[in-house]
Image (cartoon, rainbow, N blue to C red):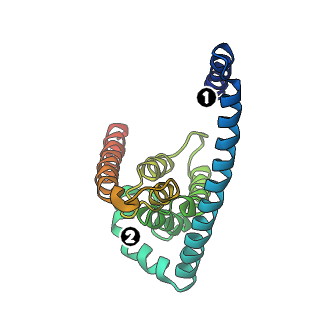
């Protein structure tokens, strides 16, 4: 569906430009946007590489394991059906730590590994192929993603010349606290309804 929407918007823009004799501007806008996209990708690639490296250093130094241990009560509350010694706990904690630090893209590998481990657990314990409660909870918590430092947003704002790229930090903290609280409440209500 989204592909059709994008195709419609692109074709409508081209048609509008052609009808109003602005095809040169449409072509120039497309080329400028393509160059800007490449520049933004290079900037974000550097940020991803930097923070993924820092996250890997923290992992090798044992910091992630220590933080994951400190997150144990929160993980028990969010994922009561997940065994304490299950490998998914470590990946979930790593993903949540990266998200809290605003490293959304660096959190992705840990999130994928967590979901793979949760799927293995689901396959061992359930006959049906539907997502387990833990998988759904992890997905919802991951999407809501509490962030203390919205690094990606700050990088975007800096790339586009914002005078105060970090000014978004306060509103981002407030918004993600509300979204995460809503996600936790939703998950707990759904767990309660399922009995």
Residue toward you, 116 or 10: 10
Q: Position of residue 36 (x, y in %)?
A: 63, 49
Residue found at the very far top of the displayed protein? 19
Mark 2 and mark 1: Cα distance apart in space: 39 Å
Quadrant, the C terminus: top left
Earlier residue among tags 2 and 1? 1
Residue toward you, 149 or 195: 149
Residue toward you, 181 or 119: 181
Q: Which residue is mark 2?
A: 72
- Classify 174 as above or below 26: below
Q: What residue is at 58 percent from the left and 72 percent from the top?
A: 50
Q: Secondary structure at mark 2?
A: helix
Residue found at the very far bottom of the displayed protein? 61
Q: What residue is at 64 percent from the left and 42 percent from the top?
A: 33
Q: Which residue is mark 1?
A: 2
Q: What residue is at 65 percent from the left and 26 percent from the top?
A: 10
Q: Position of residue 22 (x, y in %)?
A: 66, 23
Residue toward you, 97 or 185: 97
Q: What residue is at 54 percent from the left and 62 percent from the top?
A: 107
Q: Secondary structure at mark 1?
A: helix
Badge number at residue 63: none
């Amino acid at each position: 569906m989204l592909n059709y929407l994008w195709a419609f918007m692109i074709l409508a823009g081209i048609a509008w430009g052609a009808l109003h004799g602005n095809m040169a501007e449409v072509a120039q806008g497309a080329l400028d946007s393509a160059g800007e996209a490449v520049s933004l990708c290079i900037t974000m690639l550097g940020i991803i590489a930097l923070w993924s490296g820092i996250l890997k250093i923290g992992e090798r130094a044992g910091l992630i394991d220590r933080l994951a241990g400190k997150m144990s009560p929160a993980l028990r509350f969010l994922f009561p059906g997940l065994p304490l010694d299950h490998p998914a706990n470590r990946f979930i904690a790593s993903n949540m730590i990266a998200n809290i630090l605003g490293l959304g893209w660096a959190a992705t590998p840990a999130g994928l590994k967590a979901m793979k481990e949760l799927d293995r657990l689901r396959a061992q314990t359930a006959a049906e192929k539907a997502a387990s409660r833990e998988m759904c909870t992890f997905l919802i918590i991951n999407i809501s993603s509490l962030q203390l430092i919205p690094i990606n947003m700050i990088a975007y704002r800096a790339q586009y010349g914002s005078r105060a790229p970090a000014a978004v930090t306060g509103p981002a903290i407030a918004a993600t606290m509300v979204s995460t609280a809503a996600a936790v409440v939703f998950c707990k209500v759904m767990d309660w309804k399922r009995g």
